[in-house]
Image (cartoon, rainbow, N blue to C red):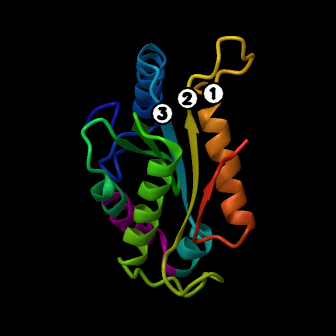
Amino acid sequence: MTADTDALTQIPNRRRFDEMLAIEIRKAKRNNTPLSVIKIDIDYFKPYNDSYGHLEGDDCLREVANALNKTLKRAGDLLARWEGEEFSCLLPDTNLKGAAHVAENMRKSVLNLRIPHQSSPVEKIVTLSLGVASGIRSDENSREDAYERLLDHAQVALTKAKETGRNRVFVYRK
C-alpha cells in the first residue's frame, strides 16, 4: 500500500485524486479539452452501518468501490475514495453528456450488486446519489475558471441528487 491508496478499498485516495485533478486541469487548459468530475455518495450509509455493523459496512464500501472502478474503461479515468462513503471520479477529455453516461452506468452497477439495505427509505438495496459537472475553457475574459470550480459544481449537483430523492444522477448546469 502507498500513501496514494485507500487502505480499505485499495483504490486511489483523496490525495491522489487532488494530485491528478491538478495535472488534468493543466492538460485540459493546454489542450482546450473538457474535464468532468463525478461526486458519488452511498445513500443512507450511516443507517447501513448502524443496522449491519462496521465490518459489513467495510465490505459494502469495498464492493461498491470495485463495482464503480469496473465501470471505468479508459486509462486516464480515475476513481478515488474521497472520505467515508463518498467517492470522486475524474474523467479527462469527457464532456457533460459523456460524464452523465458514466455516472448512470456507475449507479446501475451498484444497483446490480443487490446489497441488502433494509434501513434505506429509498430502496431495500444499496443505492447511490451522483453529481456530475464538466468544465471547458470559456473565453479568456471570463472571471471564473470552469476547471477550478469543477469540484464545487459536482458537489452542488450531488446535493441536488440527494434533495430530489436519491438513487439518481444530477447534472450541474449553470
Looking at the rendered structure, the kind of residue marked 2 is Ile
Q: Main SS of the magenta segment?
A: helix
Residue furthest front as drawn: 139
Badge 3 crowding class, 10 Å Cα cut-off, few under 14, some 14 to 19, many 20 or more, is many
Q: Looking at the rendered structure, which numbered label has been put on residue 35?
A: 3
Pointers 1 and 2 in contact (C-beta within 8 Å): yes
Which of the labelled discs sits on residue 146, or is there none?
A: 1
The percent position of residue 86, horizontal first and vertical second, equals: 53, 53
Which residue is denoted by mark 2 in the rendering? 136
Quadrant of the snapshot with the N terminus: top left
Q: Secondary structure at mark 1?
A: loop
Of marks 1 and 2, the one in the foreground: 2
Give the extent of the magenta segment. Answer: 52-66
In the rendered image, the vertical position of residue 86 relative to residue 140, given as above or below: below
Residue sitting nearer the eye, 137 or 37: 137
Q: Position of residue 116 (x, y in %)?
A: 45, 84
Kindly state the secondary structure of the residue where label 3 is placed. strand
Q: Earlier in the sequence, mark 1 or mark 2?
A: 2
What is the C-alpha distance between the residues marked 1 and 3? 9 Å
